[in-house]
Amino acid sequence: MELQRFIIQKSLVTETEPDLKQLIPVFHHWIQQQEIEGHLLIDVGDYLHLRHDPRLLLVAHEATLGVIRSDTRTFLQYQRRRPSPDSLSQRILQGWSTLQQASDMLEQESELNPKFCFQPHRYRFISNDHLWQDTAADGTSNLKHALEEAFTASGNPGCKILSEGEDTNRRLMLKFDHLPVSGSEQAVDCEKTLVS
């Protein structure tokens, strides 16, 4: 049995709590233009009036992009919904690439105030399948190997596992850094904007 359902998260770095309502027209525009590669964008789920997560969802046939609050921080997350015949490392790479595309687009979105900036290079990977977690032999080590293999295949092999444990729902969670060989200039500019 292979892990199909998983979550990859990237933290928003802001000095003030962002007004997430601003994202609703942005997500609707993404749907109209079908902006996310390899995903059929369908709808926006607005749950901002509720206290539980996710607060906001961009729903695609294959996955959802969501905004959640966790550990007093706001995260953009990619959550895989549909099975794929690809290998686990290929699925991870596709999910990570989609999360990167979405966070890059939000950082470039001029209508957002304050500007959205994401913590560069640091991510959380969560297994969203308790059956796989309870039955997979050497699940954690296989997952670490798949993460490293995914980034090696991308041509940017700088994946470093920082910690492993469980989230509040008892799901396996790995925190990791991905330090690309090149292409980090935008993240640096975003951090400078925050500081200034």
Image (cartoon, rainbow, N blue to C red):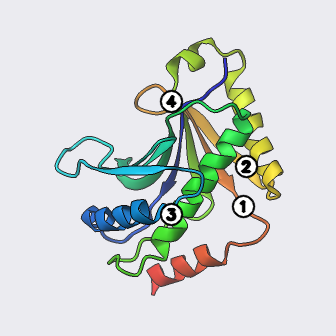
User: Could you tell me which secondary element the residue under label 2 belongs to?
Assistant: strand
**Among the two numbered marks 1 and 3 on one chain, the one whose residue lies closer to the N terminus:** 3
The residue depicted at 52 percent of the width and 24 percent of the height is 129
Q: Which residue is mark 3?
A: 35
Residue 168 or residue 142, whichever sits in front: 142
The tag earlier along the polypeptide, 4 or 2, is: 4
For the residues labelled 1 and 4, say whether their Cβ atoms are less than 8 Å apart: no
At 61% across and 77% down in the image, what residue appears? 186
Tag 4 residue: 128
Q: Quadrant of residue 120?
A: bottom right
In the shown orientation, is residue 168 left or right of residue 103?
A: left
Residue bearing mark 2: 160
Query: In the displayed structure, does residue 144 sit left or right of residue 57?
Result: right
* Up/down of 8 relative to 167, above or below: below
Query: Where the C terminus falls, by quadrant?
Result: bottom left
Say what secondary structure mark 4 lies in. Answer: loop
Q: Please name the amino acid that badge 3 sits on.
A: Glu
